[in-house]
Amino acid sequence: MSVLAPTADDAQPDGPMPGRFRRLARRAVQPKVLILGSAVVVVAYLAIVPIIFLVLGTFVGPEGVTLDAFRRAYSRTDFSVLALNSATFAIGATTVSLTIGALLAFLTERTDVRFKRVIFASALVPLVIPGLLYTISWIFLLSPRIGVYNKVLEPIVGPGALDVFTIGGLIFVEGLAEAPVAFLLMVAAFRSMDPSLEESAMMSGVPVRTLFRRITLPLVRPALFGAFLLTFVKNLQTFEGPALLGVPGDVWVFTSQIWRSLNFLPPDYGAAGALSLTLVLVTTLGMWIYYRSTRGAKRYQTISGKGFRPRTIALGPMRDVVSGVVVIYFVLTIIVPVLMLVYMSTQKFYSIPTLERLGRASLDSYREVLERPQILDAFTHSFMLSIATGLIVLGLAALVSWFTVRSRVRGRWLLDNLMLLPLSLPGLVIGVSLLFVYLRFPLPIYGTLWILLIAYVTGKLPHGMRYASASMYQIGSDLDESAQVSGASWLEVFRRIYLPLLFPGLFAGFLFIVLTTMRELGSSLLLYSPGNEVISTVIWEMYANGQFTQLAALGVILIAISLCIVAAAHLVARRYGFQAR
Amino acid sequence: MVASGRGSRSGKLACALGLAGTLALGAIAPAMAQDPSGSAPAVHSNPEVAAGKARIQAVYDEVAGLTGEERRAKLVEMALAEGGEVAFYGSLQPEQSGPILVDFENLTGVETIHYRAGGNTVATKILEEVDAGFTGADVVAINAAEIILLDDAGILASLASEPLRETLLESTRFENWLGVYLNAFVYSWNTDLVDASTLPGTHEGMLADFQGTMAFDIDNYDWFFALTNDYLIGELGWTQEQAVEALKARMAKSRLSSGTTLTLQLLAAGEFDLSPTGYASTINQMSADGAPVGWYPGQPEPVFVRPNGIGIVANTTRPASAILLLEYFLSDAQETLATRFGRTPASVEVSSGGIPEELDTRMVDIEAFAEKEDEYRALWDEIVDAAGG
């Protein structure tokens, strides 16, 4: 039943006006309407503020309404080249992320592959490495003259065989960086899958490959689409890779042009807005396609009233081979880049690793990082803000996803789209819009941690929504219908049926949001105030000051802390019966 | 009934979205009359700014004629009466600004509040704060191209009465802001890969004859402006077309990079042989740490330098504290910047750190750059398009 579905009251013929008002008033104070209504208003408000700012900043100039910002934005670059590069990059990187994320999720959740816990933790590592640092560590692995992988391959294929400063390099690095997003979404989907269909197919002698293609894949389609959409938009919006890898390779995409507009003096927010609005249009188109493709969502409802535990597929003789391939993948794409960071953190400056230089390793950078003024405060603030952002975003997303998935309100896709829009906005644009608004807001939150919290919640809502709604699609309506028939209120149904069943998805989303909030930079830099520093502003400072080895040391510390958070989250999750097997 | 039920349900969503939209508009409304497109807002008419300027001038008038310790003691007394705190917004790295501010606190007993970000972000934040009537920064120190933004917006107080302006290089004295230190743009090279004695020694030689991989930072508009406008056109008598063609020809054999930090790390690691726009102080620091990078001797002249400026934000409510901190940066801190951090101070009374005196240095004409910025950005973009052939 929908929050706003016709009730028995609605079914009655319209009575005299006072009676209708009474009914409306009575319904308005129902907990369901109050809670859902408030959640919808809050998320819509958070998403609309930067959008209005963006639209005003783009279309309103000193002389009134104008399209000048579009002229400025697109006169600096050839639109068709920009669009083609952006599409090639985003589709390519999304395909890489999705293939890796979905495969790893399938292997850890549904097969008897070895080292599951290690895979789960390692798969999340790219999430926690500051974006700048992750990209830089790949530059040192794959740049034509000094790349370590190139040096290793040189005797076989000659010098400079791999070049990270190309669109291929950009797709590869960003694809790897976003793979954890797809991994976490797909983990939740595979975990919540009803195995009965697969079992029936197996009983009928269907080969594993056909079973995967015809049954498993269609069942996780909503999550796959969600992951595609999220990583696609994220790749369109990502900035570090296009700036550090794309620009040297003359591969310009929307975000590198936005970044360039924001580097102007004064920053050209109008031109950045014009480019961002183009991204907003692409996102809206994506949402529309997403909704069309998941219209028959009931087909994917695999969590029903029947108890089940997804079956583990035995890989048989392939078990060791698959495990070996996964290990090699992790060594080359995660362990080695992290080791590069560790190496950088022990040197005075970067140079190609040799035994002699390893002998000169020192821990000075770590000492310098830990002796930095305010570092402890920055860690504490980032930690508190990340946890709070995770809880608030997922609380709101759980409620609103019920509204967008379960209710039958027409135009609900609009709300879903609205919540996805902040993803198309560069963090700096969100930062400027919030600075603009809350400096003039009656509540004195400017200059406090609250404004950072609002910025983070706004920026992370799209992710929270995808995690929550992908899980919501998998929950059958039979459970809450049975509960309601038995007299349970909506609140009880939500609390006792939906929340526990959504938990795997929400948990994955929580981990994702906590880990990525720690490194959110664009909005933090503008909105932090003296005394309210966060860790990402410290990271930026180190990069801007050329304190490269300290930055690497901080990256290593962050990875260690984040892995502790993942481990702690697992302990908590296990307590509630949810864990990486 | 079904139709009416649907209509009612979508109506409720519309209501919720409408309410959210109204709230959002309500939040933005107070600022809707202003231009959010990012162009520097004109705030000359802001009464807080005008009042602040008058307050600052009143303090200058009050301490006029006082010098040395007597002047400082008077300013300290007035600063403590203002609350004993001063807010400093700047782009100077914390390892350098931190110790300077601590020394200031120890000397004066006035506490500092420090906001640190890139100059662009600092300028944006101050513009927005002043525009909204929020008193955040008292003193600001960012690079010249950025501080001009604040000056153009009319939110810097006049420093015409500042006696220390006479101690600074003449080219760093402006009506509303003054130079603190200078950044020198230098050709920097990997000393393992480049023999400095074989370098052409002139800018035009570097463009035409350098035999190696050069990496150009994509954002060095002001360096490009100075090289072209001041030297190639102004001194060698080239036409603008000649200058652009020469740079395009060099760019076709070069690579682009983004971000000074990454460029210098890649230079030290050997990915490039030479970069034309390193900061001398950063390369000195890297070289002292043992990195194979250098920039002197062999440096083409003139060396272009760009000042980092300091000013007082006019809506300050702590004028004496602001003047006290500004004067500290222009006096005691000049020595610290030179001796402890290898920077080139703007004061002529302190010997320059980091740049040999025999080098011909030339200030980037920031005001001319601001006037011709659009033209030179377009030209630079054209040159950048030629990168890598």
Image (cartoon, coloured by chain):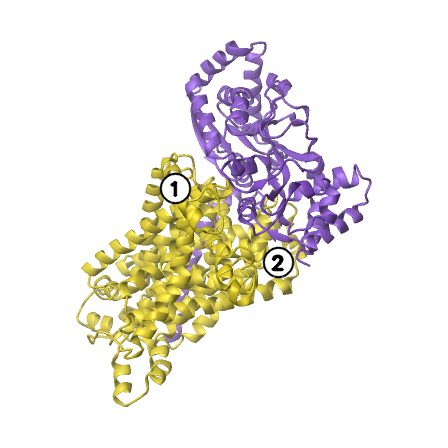
Image colour for chain A is yellow
Front residue of B42/A316: it is A316
- Give the residue type that dot 1 points to: Ser
- Give the residue type that dot 2 points to: Asp
Q: Is residue A28 visible?
A: no
Residue found 36% across the figure and 53% down from its top = A515
Indicate the chain on which mark 2 is placed: A
Q: Quadrant of the N terminus of chain B?
A: bottom left
Q: Which residue carries the number 2 mark? A: A250
Front residue of B46/A92: it is A92
Image colour for chain B is purple
Give the percent coordinates (x, y) of residue A55: 55, 53
Residue A305, relative to residue A432: is it above or below? below
Give the percent coordinates (x, y) of residue A416: 42, 63
Q: Quadrant of the C terminus of chain B?
A: bottom right
Give the percent coordinates (x, y) of residue B26: 46, 47
Front residue of B88/A292: it is B88
Quarter occupied by residue B201: top right
Q: Which residue carries the number 1 mark? A: A362
Q: CA distance from mark 1 to mark 2?
A: 37 Å
**Sequence-wise, which precedes: disc 1 or disc 2?**
2
Residue A286 left/right relative to A8: right
